[in-house]
Amino acid sequence: MKFQRCKIFEHQKVRLDYDDLKCNTRKSGRTYVTPTGERYPSITTVLGHSKKKYIQEWRKRVGEAEADRISHHACTRGTAVHDMIERYLKNEDNVVGSNTLPHILSSWIAIQPVLDSRMGKISMLETPLYSHHLTVAGKVDCIAEFDGKLSVVDFKTSTRIKTADEIHSYFMQEAAYAIMFEERTGTPITQLITIMMVENDPNPLIFKEHRDNWTDKLMKEIANYLIYEKTQGTKSNS
């Protein structure tokens, strides 16, 4: 497939009081250090905490070798597709290479028309954010106009079609980014967009949610995580 760019994206500079956030990744999860010295867990670490039990059960059910194979395949595909999307939105050339694997290429063919027809002015790409209110941090995929409205846009890959009831954690993660963005810039965002590229499916799934439908659930997840961390800290010091 010969790469053909169909759109040049306009970028809007958003001022933050920092260029980057120091990130520490350990077995227990990822933390970010704010410009004022606070250490906040990443939102993916917080939301992933409640899924650890199910992941362990899944690995036990399918076997460690098969679980590693599936996880590696999913991670490789997800990283490659995210990289292509980011470079395309940055208006870079040669997004698709001659050595692009077929299953990754099919995801790109599915997502490019959505980017061209529904994405507008871009404010952030792969930008670290944090919130003193939420006491979490993270790196947002994209903040841009989607269908003409400023949105948190998250790109996901999947091996199967999923329903909205299966991806509540995605919506909570996006709500967290919306709150972080408003806290850092003063500009509110209420629209949350999840674009999911399903392997071997030419039609991406697009979920559109409102931030305020997920803030209460998000706060409960953060509170549960902080209780767990405090309990673990007490145990390790006893």
Image (cartoon, helix red, strand yellow):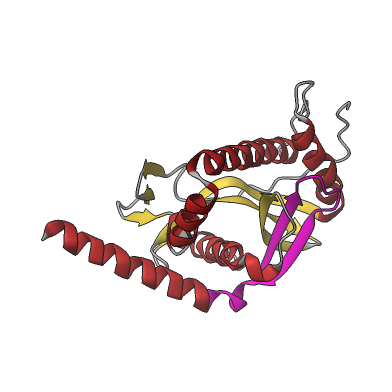
* Quadrant where the N terminus is found in the figure: top right
Where is residue 10? Give x, y as percent: 76, 45
Nearer to us in this view, 182 or 217: 217
Nearer to us in this view, 224 or 182: 224
Residue 215's place in the image compared with 103, above or below, is below
Where is residue 235? Give x, y as percent: 18, 62
Nearer to us in this view, 50 or 7: 50
Q: In the picture provided, is 224 more to the left or to the right than 204?
A: left
Residue 171's place in the image compared with 78, above or below, is below
Range shown magenta: 190-215
What residue is at 73 percent from the left and 65 percent from the top? Answer: 207
Where is residue 153? Give x, y as percent: 67, 56
Q: Does residue 166 show up magenta in the picture?
A: no
What residue is at 21 percent from the left and 60 percent from the top? Answer: 233
Where is residue 157? Give x, y as percent: 68, 48
Q: Report whether residue 196 is seen.
A: yes
What residue is at 37 percent from the left and 66 percent from the top? Answer: 225
Nearer to us in this view, 126 or 80: 80
Q: Does residue 193 show up magenta in the picture?
A: yes
Dividing the picture into quarters, in which one does residue 25 lie?
top left
Q: In the picture provided, is 212 more to the left or to the right than 226?
A: right
What residue is at 44 percent from the left and 58 percent from the top? Answer: 52
As drawn, the residue found furthest toward the top would be 98
* Quadrant where the C terminus is found in the figure: bottom left
